[in-house]
Each structure stands twice: as C-alpha cells, then as structure tokens.
Amino acid sequence: AQRLRDEALARLEEAQSIARIGSWELDPATGLGHYSDEVYRILGRAVPEQRRRHRFEELLTASDTATQLRIERMLEDMRTGSVQIDVLLPLIGSDRQQRMVHLRAESVQGPPEPPAIHGTFQDVTEREQSRRLLREREEQFRELVRVLPDGMMILAEERVMYANAACSAQFGFSGETILGEPLQALVAATDYAQVRDLLRHGSQRDDGVPTARCMCRQDGSHFYAGLSIGDVRYGGRDCKLLVVRDLSEPERMRDALAESNSELQAMAKRLFSLQEDERRAISRDLHDDIGQAITAIKLSAHAASTESDADERQEDLREIVSLADSTIVKLRNLSMLLRPPQLDALGLEAALRWQASMLFRSSPIRLHLDIQPLPGRPSNEVEQACFRIAQESLTNALRHACAGEVTLTLRPQGEQLYLQVTDDGDGFEPEGPRGLGLIMMRERAQTAGGTLSIESAPGAGTRVELHLPYHVGGRPADANNGR
C-alpha cells in the first residue's frame, strides 16, 4: 500500500510539473499550510529539503501595492468563511521575475476532518502573454481596417454585418447605419447578378485582380468600384469579406486625360496649320512688298548709274533712299510681329505698354493700364509667357468681346508675378468648347511654372488672371523700364 501511495504521489508530482499546477492546503485557524513542490517552482522559490508549514502570505510577493492589498483581503476572506476564489494575480518570484498566477481555492468542511482550504496555483504567464499579444494584434487589425482608404464590409446571407468607416462613407451612410443593409440595395440593378455570382465563386479565384462593378449609394447615385472577395469567420459563422475600392477619382482622371489628349491633338493639328499659314503670309510679304521694293531699288540704282543729267540722277537717288526707308519700315514691322524688340530692349512693362497702345490706337474701346514697376526682370521664359498671354487676352477682348472698357494690371506679388486682364464685354461659357488661343494660354502658363484662371459668363464680361514664379535678382531691370 505504501508503494502504491508513493507511486501515486510521484505521478501526481509529474503531472503537476507538466501542467505547471501546484496544490496546497491551508488551515484557516492557524493560517499555516502545506504546499506541493510545484508551488515553490511556480513562485520562483527553491523546494525546501525539510518540509515545514508556511503562512500563505510568506510565499506571495505582489507586483504592485493594489495587488498586495487584494491578496490580504483574499486571505482574510479565506480564513473567516467558506469562500470560493478564482483570480489571476501578478506576482514577483524570489528570482525577481514577474509571473501571472491563476489561484483557485475553496473551503472544505466535514467531520471527522477539521475545516481546511484546498487550492491550486497555475503558472499562466505564457498563456496571458499570448492572450495579450492576440489582443494587441486584434486592436492593430481593427485600427488598420478603420483607417483603410478602401471600404471593407462583412456579409452574411447578403446582409452587412460589419463595415468600416470608409465603406459607410462610400455608400453615403453615417456611422453604423449601414449595418443590416441588404446587398441588393448597395449594388446597381444592372450588376447585382454579377456581384452575387462573384460572392459565390470569387474567393476561388487566385489572380488577385479586383472586378469593377457599378455600386449604388444611399441617395440612389452610382459609382464604379473595384471589388475583391474573401472568406472570413465572423460572429461564429462563415461570412464573405468584400473590399470596395472607389474608382470615381481614377475614372475622372482618365476622362480628364482623354480630354487633354484630345485637346493636344487638336492643338497640334491647328498649330501645323497656323505655321503653314504664317509661313505663307511671311513669304507673301517678302515677295510682294520687300521683294518688289528691292527690285525697285535695283532698277532706280541702275537708272541713276546710267543717267547723264545731274538733276535726274539726284531724283533717282532720292527715290532709292525713299524706297530703302519704306523697306526698312516694312522689315521692322514684320520683325515686330515675330517678337517685339521692346521686350528685349526695355523689358516686360514697356513691351506691354507698347503692345496695348498698338492694338487699341484706332479702337473706341477705353483702355486702362495699371502697370507697376518691377524691382527686377523676370526670367526669359516667364517674361515671354506673360507677354504672349497678355497679348492674346487683349486681342480677344478687342476682337470678340464687344467690350466698352478693358483693363490690364501687372504687379509683383511676393515671389509671384501677377497679370490681370478684364473686360466688360459679352463674356462666354468657360465650360463650352475652347478655342486654340485659350488652350495655348494655359499651355504657356503651365510651361513657365504658373497658373492661369479664366472667369467669364455670358453677358458678364471676362477676367483673366495669371500667376507666374518671380524671383528678383535674376536679370537687371532697365532704368527706363515701364516708362
């Protein structure tokens, strides 16, 4: 019998060591107790060679004051009544290592044995660490889902069980009001059957490519979205995970890109046509005016060289000088059409004054110029862009606006150059078809690193505003600049 008892105790000790569970028995009258070897090991203490009875509190060292007070109250309850205890205690072992211990105890009464308290210690440090890590991972996952820019919903039997904030916003719901919504209310009728089929079989696909479908917002409006499907467990049941990526902005950008490409193609076509027209006009001017004038000079020079009469020879020379003067004027005018020399010689302010006066010199339209002196010349690129945009704006106001008054403003604004051209003419619809001139103005502004805005409406006149980068000190300003 003793051998069997020893074998049973040995197996019990082995089982306690494997499960990291120690047993103990406490006499409530004296506060002294017996403890198994595993209790000492769990509490980081050496197993004594000579067993003796210990007070319970001699073995327990709390990790903080609150836990220590809790232990004292628990011991008092155990000594004074039949109390069942089932608690987790953060303790510090004699090895100074913190561990989490699961303490269970209950009073045992019954003759002929005196009342006693039996209990167990279990080291659950690793278990609690795993639970804590799991909670942290769950919190991280919830936060990740919450801040995702894509919508995410969990569906059970085609009803929304969960939706993150982005998903609610995509469909026009506030907070959790989307919960319980049927899938049919969130998908356009034309695509509902395809989305249902995707939910049934989509998770079996392995290409990872979202499928674009038309979705329906709470207010009835539609938007295209890329859908990705997955399987997930939620609330103890098999559900479908649906990730919704709003494609409205990419669609808008694609449409804008297509429109820009179309405008560029039209602009390139028109530019080629204008280049040919301009070349023909220059060729015609050179041939008809300049060529004929040079021919006349040649004939007059030949006549003068063979003229014996001095008076007649003087008359031929005066004609040659007159023809040469008129030819120089024609060449200057032709050169100024290509690039005004005032822009290079005097700068932007003087060039704008000259251009405006040339355009409006025979027009009844009232012209107001508010051109402030610039502290320094802008870069060549900025100067040319500003001059050409002002030139185009003034020409449009003169030819197409039927305006009574036109105002041009030029001034520095910090690190920007500001140009404004306004008129009180007929105006136009900015969202309507745009001519090549307006497209070229925007292209010039963007190429120079600036921005151009055009405000107009039928019968409300037009305002053109240009902002260009401007850094003083790049090029010296002429002393007469703008005068």
Image (cartoon, rainbow, N blue to C red):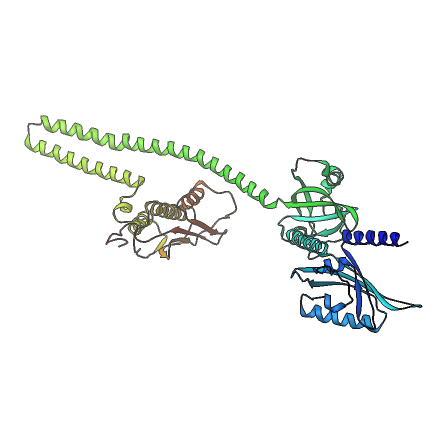
Residue, far right: 111
Nearer to me, 284 or 108: 108
Judge left or right: residue 117 versus residue 325: right
Compared to 29, does 257 lie above or below?
above
Whether residue 286 appears in this view of the structure is: yes
Residue name at image x 80 percent, y 52 percent: 15
Q: Position of residue 194 (x, y in %)?
A: 73, 38
Residue name at image x 45 percent, y 37 percent: 267
Q: Position of residue 215 (x, y in %)?
A: 69, 45
Asked where in the image residue 131 lies, by quadrant, the reply is: bottom right
Nearer to me, 383 or 138: 138
Nearer to me, 470 or 29: 29
Asked where in the image residue 119 lies, by quadrant, the reply is: bottom right
Q: Position of residue 2 (x, y in %)?
A: 88, 54
Residue name at image x 18 percent, y 31 percent: 297
Q: How many marks?
A: 0
Whether residue 176 appears in this view of the structure is: no
Judge left or right: residue 228 versus residue 396: right
Q: Position of residue 240 (x, y in %)?
A: 74, 44
Quarter of the figure that contains the C terminus: bottom left
